[in-house]
Image (spheres, grey):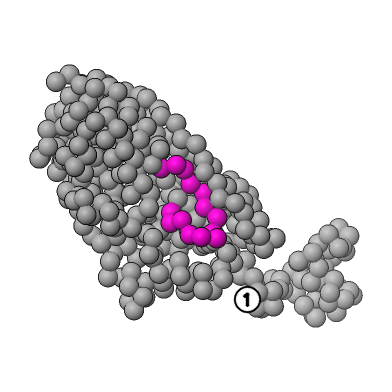
Amino acid sequence: MKDVAREAGVSQAAVSYAYSRPGKLSDGQRLHIMETATRLGYAGPNIVGASLRSGKIGAIGVMLMDTLEYAFTDPSTRALLEGVVQSHKFDDLALTLLPLPHDAESLQPQNGGDRSALQGLVDGVIVHSLPDDHSALLTLQSRGIPMVIVDAPRLAGVPLVGIPDRQAARGQLDHVLRLGHQRVGIIVERLAPDGFHGRVSASRRVRSTEGVVRERVEGYRESYEAAGGDFQRVPIIEAGAFDLTSGSEAAHALLDNHDVTAVVTTSDTMAIAALKAAGERGLRVPEDLSIIGFDDAYEAERWGLTTIRQPMVEKGTLAATMLFDMLRDNSTPASVSLPTELIVRQTTAQPTR
């Protein structure tokens, strides 16, 4: 920087302003400095040095409860990231994806359960749907790193962007029951990140650490019992993961062992997996089997899927805006709950048997 200042005949502060505060210079002066810097091979201030002086890294993180592949294949997470980008609040910063362990053993602190949080050098974090007891949350709080939570968990003093999951899930099952279905099965993604998959017991339901799925299952219980049914008799199958393969295995397990006329799922991915499984078994949808999803992801309309629409992109935009305000003003925004809507398409109808 001193060499550029000497060569350009300006102060070292002027060179600094050319990169960090160009509004303090005339266009001609800044152009002269940048041309001189280019001629001398100077690429600009050292980013690491600047971050040490300012205490800012110049990056925000998005913390995910799965692998990096999940960020690009899960419809809900893709939409969240799209919303973060569309906010344009961090266009001049880096976006760091922080994947976290997703099995019970690696979640333990002695096994490096919060290693991703420790390695992610970020100024603030958007947390997307972590289990209630994940150690990375303690790491963020102990280090005083600003964070906004999307969906779950709910932490005192931490702003959250979410939806009324229980109420929306009641709307799902209410729709199916209004059509006349009595034999209903449920497919959930995951109640706890411990590798379990299969029929869910009442005790496992109660012990769930996945706030979103737990709330949706409670919504199903409230809806079924309000209609006079015994929810303990409703088969709930846990896929154990969020992908189509796991969802397909769960759907086949449900249809192998239970005579149901409708399948309610906690995500569109699980619903699409159930649609594929029904097709493999020669079942017609909705004549033989009604299926309803949750999210209204991009693929839902193509499949004609009846589902619950939630504003997934808007969640990302709001979370990014709230985090931006926290970093700028050192403030704590209020939590936001967004509305949902039942979207009826071609995969639900009255039972024919």
Taking the magenta stretch, the answer to whether it contains residue 164 is yes
Does 102 appear above or below 71? below
Left or right for 258, reference 340? left
Give the residue type at disc 1: Val
Q: Is residue 321 left or right of residue 234?
A: right
Q: Residue at x 14, y 20 (%)?
A: 353
* Residue at position x 66%, y 56% in the image: 325
Q: Quadrant of residue 5?
A: bottom right
Residue 171 position (above or below residue 34):
above
Residue labelled with disc 1: 48
Q: Does the image show residue 155?
A: yes
User: Percent from the top left, x then y, of residue 195?
Assistant: 23, 60
Q: Secondary structure at mark 1?
A: helix
Task: Report if residue 179 lies within the magenta region.
Answer: no
Residue 331 x %, y %: 66, 60
Of the pair 185 and 230, the residue shown nearer to us: 230
On-image quarter of the N terminus: bottom right
Q: Main secondary structure of the magenta part?
A: loop
The magenta span reads 152-165
Q: Is residue 117 left or right of residue 210?
A: right
Q: Residue at x 65, y 78 (%)?
A: 52
Residue 23 x, y percent position in the rendering: 83, 59
Residue 316 seen from this side? no
